[in-house]
Amino acid sequence: MKLENKVAVVTGGNSGIGFGIAEALKIEGAVGVITGRNQATLDSSAKALGEGFIGVKGDVTNLSDLENIFRVTGLKFGKIDILVVNAGGIVDGVPMAGIDDVTEESYDLYMDLNLKSTYFTVKKALPYLNDGASIILIGSSAAHRAAPGMTIYSAAKAAVISLAKGLSLDLLSRKIRVNTLSPGSIDTPVFGKIVPEEQVDAVKKIWIDITPVGRQGVPADIGRAAAFLASDDSAFIVGTEILSDGGLTNLSLMK
């Protein structure tokens, strides 16, 4: 119970990696808020987490929604100790693409969701954060590897890693630590948004084959790493990145 009675906010905590993080924080004793845009999944996820967590609907690309998320959290739980900036990823209805097919609109949508929203989630949270709080930005191993169609997403996540360093400097006077947690290939429903359903298993197999540990990650893998960064066990870790990717970035399977 390393996080007993700590107050956490996990954006995009209604599914996938975000829910896995919220679950891990709850196991360690935290209470707080998960956010999401889909009311049905938000309600079911909050119910699954049980007493101590509530769902607050909001779109992280909307600054008014962000302000409401933190206002509601403050009224319900008081000051925030842990902020996990997880919301991001695929823009609904806008598939990832190569430069020939990327429009200015799709570029802006991906940057808004994966970079701008990260910065302003932190900014809007600041009045509600305790001094000494832990902020965890969710990056991606994609920031370190080029992959077809993922240029804009990868660039946004690389910028998130840089944000953690700059924001750490900005917040040193309040002893607020900012770090990035970067997943590799994690088995979540997101694959159904990237490829047709009949291709999902084959695409997962490709990721398994190139991941040195021989499997995809699961949300709980990322959750346990987030719980570490949220706790005092990581008190001397600031402005850095933890890769939770099964060796995908730093190990090669080439023979």
Image (cartoon, rainbow, N blue to C red):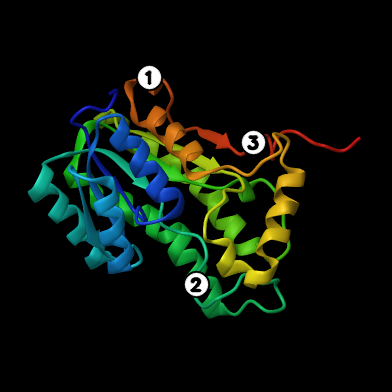
Residue 150 location (% of width, % of height): 65, 62
| Relative vertical location of residue 132 with respect to residue 158 in this rendering, above or below | above
Image x and y of residue 66, in percent: 25, 60
Q: Residue at x 67, y 41 (%)?
A: 215
| Image: 105 above or below 238 | below
Instruction: Report which residue position mark 2 lands on.
Output: 108
Amino acid found under the numbered disc labelled 1 = Asp
Left or right: residue 161 compared with residue 177: right
Where in the figure is residue 181, as x and y percent of width and height?
49, 39
Res. 178 image quadrant: top left
Question: Badge 2, how many Cα within 10 Å: few under 14, some, many 20+?
Answer: few
Instruction: Determine whether the residue tagged by mark 2 lies in a helix, strand or loop.
Output: helix
Query: Which sits earlier in the primary sequence, circle 2 or circle 3?
Result: 2
Q: Determine which of the numbered discs, if any, sits on residue 233 in the image.
A: 1
Label annotation for residue 94: none
Query: Label 2 sits on what residue type?
Result: Asp
The reply, left or right, for residue 151 in relation to residue 59 is right
Q: Nearer the viewer, residue 93 or 128?
A: 93
| Viewer can see residue 38 | yes
